[in-house]
Amino acid sequence: MSDGVIDVTSLHDYLRVREWSLFRNDDRRSIWQHAGSGKRVFIPNSQQSDFDDIIDIAIENIAITEERSPVEVRLDISWAGWDKLSAWRAAPTATLSIADAVDMHLALNDLILSAARAAVDKRRAFIGGRRPRSVDAYMDKVRVLASAPGSFVTRALLPLNAASQETLPMIGPAEPRVREVAVTLMRASQAAVTTAKRFASGEANVDSWDQAIPYGVSANLCDALARLCGFGEDDRPADVSLTVDWTWSKPEAAEVEAVKVPAGLAATLVSGSQYLRDQPDEFMVSLTGLVVRLHRDSPMGAGEVTARGYIDGLDSGPRSLRLELDEVTYRQAISAHDLGHTIHVVALARNAARSLEVIRVESFHTVTPG
């Protein structure tokens, strides 16, 4: 299924792999019995007027028997061809600012994209350019789920990427190629965290990042993991956990159950990304975007602005830069902010403990509208 709709075939497939067995079957209904508890559920075999009501009752009873949420049971049945990826970020409450929430979703997108590209071709970094059609086709099928309870959880449905998905046998582990992107994502994320830990503790040198490339680690993936933690945002980075709820049955190749990304490793992951991109300690960045924040302590003089937009050469979502501007340039920034005009910034920057730090602004100008 691809529309989140319950049908009888998907429901039967679900029951077969969840320790239920067919007890009785006729034209009107089938009766299924749970191996552990002996409880039974009734499934309609034809579209009758009360079909939806009977299905709702069946799902409720299945959930009670399996000690699961009815919402999760319905999700597994209606999205049978998708694995469910969850990214959990520690937070004092179950909320983030709207800007941080958007950043987290963008980082999750970039993490999935880096895994999809690594599943096709392992590289140090993926820098712009045209992506393989298979990668774009896969990304078009990814869906975002409603958030789950927790500090802050964002979830995505990762499609099984076999060309013959409709004929995929639902009993037993799926072939590795069927969920290559999801498996690559988890393996590569674990390899990146392991490498970052070893590098941070002094157990490994910078060449250890090269050794992680065959696992799917890239500059893009390291950057996305750091941003999932909140690296580069106003608040301090926080711990993140990645888990996948595998549809139907866990793949034999997916030995990684969960990946925990400590907040303290975010800067090290950014350093790994910098190394894999062959960037020096200090490097030039070119950002096109908008002025989103203005600040100065007096009515006259220099001031600080925050510009947010896309950085040339980074195949990722928008980034924020804090810029110290002289009085004349600051007035330009005020005008661009008030009028909503696009700006272009060239600056010398470096990776700092929490974000990309601008050392010196080389140029700042407004892009002429139209």
Image (spheres, rainbow, N blue to C red):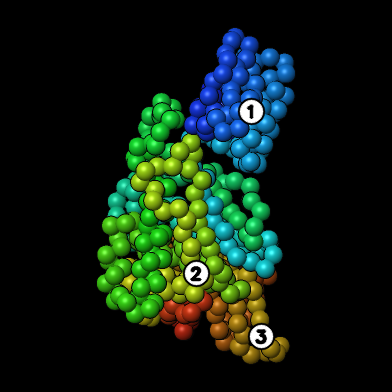
Q: Is residue 283 left or right of residue 79?
A: left
Picture coordinates of residue 186, whole percent (x, y): 42, 54
Q: Earlier in the sequence, mark 3 or mark 2?
A: 2
227 or 39, which is in the foreground?
Answer: 39
The residue at the point 29 percent across, 70 percent down is 208
Verify CB contact (< 8 Å) between mark 2 and mark 1.
no
**SS assignment at label 2:** loop
Picture coordinates of residue 347, whole percent (x, y): 45, 78
Label 1 amino acid?
A: Lys
Q: Earlier in the sequence, mark 2 or mark 1?
A: 1
The residue at the point 63 percent across, 47 percent down is 146
Q: Residues within 10 Å of mark 3 (few under 14, many from 20)?
A: some
Label 3 amino acid?
A: Arg
Q: Which residue is mark 3?
A: 296
Judged by depth in the image, the label closer to the viewer, 3 or 1, is 1
The residue at the point 57 percent across, 46 percent down is 144
Q: How many marks?
A: 3
